[in-house]
Amino acid sequence: MRLVPLDDAEFAALTADVDLPVEQSLAWDAYDRAVPGRWPWKRFVFQVDEQPAAVLSLSEYVGRGFRYLWAKHGPVWLVEPTPELELALRERLVHGVHAVDPRLVFVRLHAAHPAEDLHPLLQSVTYDRTVVVELAGRSDDDLLAGMKKRGRRDLRKGLREQPVDCTEETGISAEGFAELYEVLRETAERDGFGAHPISVYTTMLDALGPQHARLFVARHAGEVQAWVIVTVHDGAATAYYAASTEAGRAHDAATQLYWHIIRTLRDEGARTFDFMGVGSEIAPSLEALTTMKTKFNPEIAEVAPAWDVPVRPWAYRALTKALAAKRAAVATARRAVPAVRGDETREEETA
């Protein structure tokens, strides 16, 4: 077993017939380069008996005083990932990372099988359950039949009694997105998470371009009530970021908007639509989203969650203790001043 570095051309050739998550694709590099504090790092193939078993794209991130690598939705396995294979890949990766750059504190990646070297994420929210809607070859009636009874009822009631205008606004200017960002701020305040700076969303749309990042908006009487940024790659669409107003919740604008998105992307050839995470034991903060997302498919899909793998164990332990102290201080402050909002102990981005 060995981990072999690949240049972009070698990676493209090896994965030509592999369905990659957008974050593991070459297309993601433009986004990494456009966001301050992160950039593409290296790509690898994990070989077993000279045959490719997995591929892996890593991005380097700079935190507050530390650096780490992030293989978002990677590795991409080309064979069944047994616990032994997952561990063997991680061991070789950690050894190689430490040899190349010992300043890197940890590697973040996905693994289906818990193990002693895997640690819960320092920050950010991961998930091990999601909702995926199959789109290929399905008519509107098929999609409706696959929904929960409650989902069909809510959708039909909304379309009949409180319809919203659902449109695609991909290519919106940064100034135009400011209106949508206010909706995100309202959502974050209501649901208790910290929104990223507006540049994270506008940069994503600009860097990935309309081929890989789409923006859909629901309006009522001209006012934005809900919006979703969807990534698309290799036939897989993913609801990456979303927000809604209180009025939009009353109109159930999100249900109508997702219905519009699913049908639009199906007609363009997308094969699947992933709602990107629902609640579970390791992701209790996503529980509030489960009811909404399972409207479109009551079946839950199990996926590999993200984990931290220390490269410098003592430094990682120090970070863990520092973050725990910070969270304790924030919790104390919030008890003293209940109106405190926007702390960074729960990030809006899911992993």
Image (cartoon, rainbow, N blue to C red):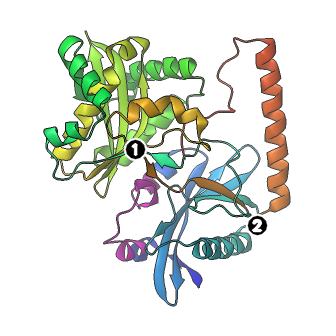
Can you give x and y, in whole percent of width and height, for residue 54 in the image?
Answer: 49, 73
User: Which amino acid type corresponds to the residue marked 2 in the rendered image?
Assistant: Pro
Q: Earlier in the sequence, mark 2 or mark 1?
A: 2
- Residue 194 visible to an observer of this rendering: yes
Q: Quadrant of residue 323?
A: top right
What residue sits 51% from the left and 20% below the top?
Answer: 185
Q: Which residue is mark 1?
A: 131
Can you give x and y, in whole percent of width and height, for residue 73 in the image?
Answer: 50, 56
Numbered label tally: 2
User: Which amino acid type corresponds to the residue marked 1 in the rendered image?
Assistant: Val
Q: Which residue is mark 2?
A: 102
Can you give x and y, in whole percent of width and height, for residue 341 in the image?
Answer: 66, 19
Task: Write down the region rendered in magenta.
Answer: 11-30
User: Which label sits in the foreground, 2 or 1?
Assistant: 1
- Mark 1 element type: loop
Structural crowding at the residue carrying mark 2, measured as other residues with C-alpha within 10 Å and reported as few (<14), some (14–19) or many (≥20): some
Up the image or down, 172 lies above or below 34; here it is above
Identify which residue, 161 or 36, lies in the foreground: 161
Q: Quadrant of residue 267?
A: top left
What residue sits 29% from the left and 44% below the top?
Answer: 210
- Mark 2 element type: loop
The quarter of the image holding the N terminus is bottom right
